[in-house]
Amino acid sequence: MSGFLGARGPRLRPLNPKRATTVSVLDVGSSKIICLIARLKPIEPGIMLPDRTHMAEVVGIGYQRSRGIRRGAVVDMNAAEQAIRLAVDAAERMSDLTVESLIVNLSCGQLGSDAYHASVAIGGHNVEDGDIDRVLKAGTAHSVRDGRSVIHTLPIGYSLDQQSFIRDPRGMTGEQLGLDMHVVTAEALPIRNLLACIERCHLAVDALVATPYASGLSALIEDEAELGTLVIDMGGGTTTAAVFHEGRFVHAESLPVGGHNVTLDIARGLSTPVNDAERLKTMYGSPLPCPSDDREILTVPLVGDDTDMPNQVPRSQLVRIIRPRIEETLEMIRDKLSASGAHALAGRTIVLTGGAAQLTGLPEVARRILGRNVRVGRPLGISGLPENYKGPAFCASVGLAVYPQVAQFEQFQPRSRGTRATGTDGGYFTRVGAWLRSF
């Protein structure tokens, strides 16, 4: 399947299929910060993986509880810097490599999608690389709303005269070359703060990747991406969604709510400390009621209570607190997709990723509200992951490591040994700014 989950064309620089390389990624979330160092090895002859030229193997992992991050955005520069430094340092120690540049996920800034169409005259000759360059430039000439920056610019499909749904028009003949594009944008200010925080760690950013896109790269199988799938990444502070159709990332949505909101609801509803609310949610929480809930009694510590008298509540009370928040979040995703028209492209499958996707009973509730088949996604296509890193909470991290070989933006070049090249590159923000204005 050509172009699986990524943009293809002459503006994309593929990895050398005969050479191994190392890539470093940083997953900045509201509840955790993860640094992965992965070695991309050329696939051996005889192994068939669609659109993959390399196999990814994790050689270094760093994990830190998130600090200074709220809803994916930096709210305390010093605390966030320290957490990032510790995560990167742990990955460097494990791999015995030095990280100088990273691929970073993006959950903040209210991710949004815009669709554009552009066309150029080619005068009846065969389509060449220069023609595709011209139509790409025409497609990105549309103005982005004030205060927003471009994160991804993805060709969805080309057309020649009256023929549509062309994936690679090079070598074909026509009079008019058209292009449909998916442009993902986010608010510029949270991006600048995130980049500034990473720069304070003396690290550069090779690329920014929307979190639900990265999760889809990791969790989807080929048929799901081709037939249409909705990926919902439920993190600690945000819930983001990506629609994949015909192997392409075609739509993105974002909500400023996540698993931490459920924890706060429990803390307020039961008057218990936040840490105890998180424990109750993890061990006993569910949005799905069952007949035994009234008979199952939970011991709940009270805020400021220094007595030995236990406070006991039935599990049904915990379910009644969790259920409205989960249903509201799923209904908001459903309404946003319906308003955008993207629900028609999402097929009949939903894949849940992110830490909050581990909540017991969530797939059943999502199936009822969204009316589609639902499964919990796990990171695929990578080796070397410890067993406790193979859950849905780590899909985005692994997807960032997969990203270079399936997206391959012209501005992105993996650095050997997980480092960036030194020399005169015009400065960090200049280089990142050029990437944000890609194509």
Image (spheres, helix red, strand yellow):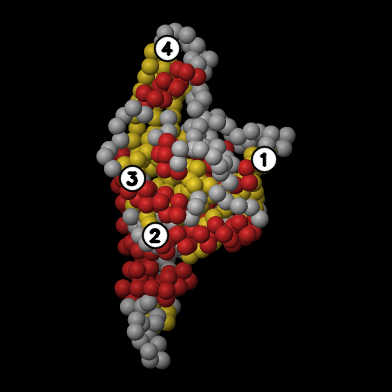
Query: Tag 1's secondary structure?
Result: loop
- Tell me: residue 157, above or below residue 394: above
Q: Position of residue 141 (x, y in %)?
A: 33, 27
Q: CA distance from mark 3 to mark 4?
A: 36 Å
Quadrant of the image containing the N terminus: top right
Quadrant of the image containing the C terminus: top left
Mark 3 belongs to which amino acid? Ala
Query: Tag 3's secondary structure?
Result: helix
State which mark lies toward you, 3 or 4: 3
Residue 286, visible in the rendered structure: yes
Residue depicted at 33% across the width and 35% down the height: 114
Q: Which residue is mark 3?
A: 188
Mark 2 belongs to which amino acid? Met
Q: CA distance from mark 1 to mark 2?
A: 35 Å
Q: CA distance from mark 4 to mark 2?
A: 50 Å
Q: Which residue is mark 4?
A: 122
State which mark lies toward you, 1 or 4: 1
State which mark lies toward you, 1 or 2: 2
Of callouts 2 and 3, which one flags the residue occurring earlier in the amino acid sequence? Answer: 2
Q: Nearer the viewer, residue 265 or 389?
A: 389
Residue 215, visible in the rendered structure: no
Q: Position of residue 63 (x, y in %)?
A: 54, 61
Mark 1 belongs to which amino acid? Ala
Of callouts 3 and 1, which one flags the residue occurring earlier in the amino acid sequence? Answer: 1
Mark 1 is surrounded, within 10 Å at the Cα level, by few (under 14), some (14 to 19) or many (20 or more) other residues, namely some
Q: Which residue is mark 2?
A: 77
Of callouts 4 and 2, which one flags the residue occurring earlier in the amino acid sequence? Answer: 2
Question: From the viewer's perspective, is 151 left or right of 417?
Answer: left
Q: Position of residue 223 (x, y in %)?
A: 54, 38
Residue depicted at 48% across the width and 71% down the height: 283
